[in-house]
Amino acid sequence: MSKEEVWRQESNSIEEAKISNKSTNFECSGCKILANAPTETKRADLELCKECFGKKKDRRQNKLNDLTGSEWALLSKSVEQYNGKRTEKQRMHGAAFPASLVESQIKIYTKKGDLVLDPFLGVGTTIEVAESLDRKSIGIELSPEFATLASRDIKDRENHKVICDDVRNLKKHIPYDFIDFIITSPPYATLLKTVKGAFAYKWREHSELNVVANPQPYSKHEADLGNLTYSEFMDTLVQIFQDTFNVLKSNSYAVWVVKDYRDLKNNVPMVNFHSDVIQAADTGGFTLWDIRIYDQTKFRPLVVLGYPSRNYYLNIGHSYILVFKKVENKKH
C-alpha cells in the first residue's frame, strides 16, 4: 500500500469517527445555558458548556480586600492617572487629591467595614470616599475651617469622625493596633512658601497659557507643619510615622501621596522630597512596599522653565504614591 493510500485510509477513518460520534444536550450546570457535548466525555458527564468546562471557582480566601482576581490585576499598574473634577470644597483647599485616587487605594487595601485614617484630612475627601465604599473613617485636621468643611457632608456620624487637632496629638485620640488602613498627603513643609505667585506669569511672552496660581500656605498657625523649616518638618514627620505605625494593625498598609519640588530661591534645583519621606517612614518603623507614579501631566499645562539660560528644568507632572506596610518583624 502506497503512502498516499495509507493517508487516505486514515483520513476516512477519522471522518467516519466524527460522523458516528453522538452528542448529548443538557443545561450547563455552571452557567445554566443550553449546551451539548460528545457522549462519553468528561464534559458530558459534568454537563458543562465549553466556556465553563475547566474553569474552577477560585475558593482561596482574599485576605486583603474584596476584589476579584481580574480587578486586583487592573488596579496594579505602577503608573496611573486619576480623573475627576475638583469639588467646591477641594478648590478651597487647593491641594486635595482626587476622589478617584482615594477610591482605588481604599479598594486595594481594605475590605468593607474596615477603618481608614487620614492624619492630614484637609477638606475630607478620604472620609467622603470611605463612606461611599462602606468603610469607616477617622480624619485629623488642624484647621477649624477645613475640619468644618470635612464634617459638613458626613451622613453616618457614628462611623465617620473628624478630629480637629494637631496630628502630633494622635495618640490621645486613637488606640494602638486600631486602624486598618492609612491614606494621606502631608503639608509639604516649605513648598507653598518657596513657590509663590503665578508660575506661568514670567513666561507669558513665550506662551499663550493663562496665568496659573499656585496653592497658598494653609495657615499661619504655629502648629501647621507647613510653616516649619524643612529639617524641622522631616524630624516631625519621623514622629508622625512612629505614631501612625503604632495605631495601625499588623500587616496593614499606609499610603502617602507626595511630590518633589524645586527651591530655586535657595539654589536647590530639586528637593527630593519623596526619598526623604521614605527615609522618615523607615525610621518610624514602616517597610517601603511599593511606589506608584501618579501621572498628572494631562491636568498640568507645560510652562517654559529656564529658557533661554543653560538651566533646563522639567515640568514636574507627577507625584509619588508611596505604599508602606507595617511588618512587625522588620529587620533594620
Image (cartoon, rainbow, N blue to C red):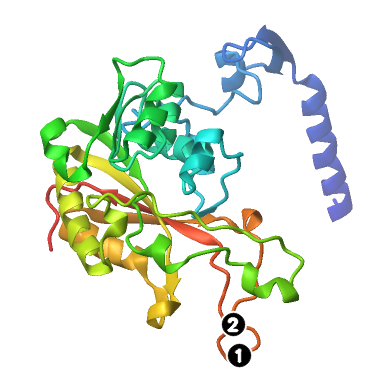
Residue at the location (33% across, 67% down)?
A: 275
Q: Amino acid at mark 1?
A: Ser
Image-quadrant location for residue 61 = top left
Where residue 177 appears, as percent x and y from the top left, is 14, 34
Callout 1 crowding tier (Cα within 10 Å): few <14, some 14–19, many ≥20: few
| Residue 164 tag number | none
Residue at the location (19% across, 50% down)?
A: 240
Check disc 1 and report its element: helix, strand or loop: loop
Does residue 319 show up? Answer: yes
Where residue 300 appears, as percent x and y from the top left, is 62, 58
Q: Is residue 217 above or below residue 133?
A: below
Does residue 2 show up? Answer: no
Q: Nearer the viewer, residue 91 or 322?
A: 91
Check disc 2 and report its element: helix, strand or loop: loop
Q: Nearer the viewer, residue 332 or 242?
A: 242
Q: Is residue 32 above or below residue 95?
A: above
Q: Amino acid at mark 2?
A: Gly
Residue at the location (53% across, 58% down)?
A: 214
Q: Which residue is mark 2?
A: 306
Q: Is residue 105 above or below residue 288?
A: above
Q: Is residue 121 above or below residue 203?
A: above
| Residue 309 tag number | 1
Image-quadrant location for residue 175 = top left
In the rendered image, the residue lying farthest to the bottom is 310
Callout 2 crowding tier (Cα within 10 Å): few <14, some 14–19, many ≥20: few
Q: Is residue 89 left or right of residue 280?
A: right
| Distance in Å between CA atoms under marks 1 and 2 | 6 Å
Where residue 60 appears, as percent x and y from the top left, is 36, 29
Residue at the location (42% across, 40% down)?
A: 105
Check whether the beta carbons of the residues at disc 1 and disc 2 lie within 8 A of each other.
Answer: yes
Q: Is residue 264 left or right of residue 311?
A: left
Count of all numbered marks drawn on residues in the image: 2
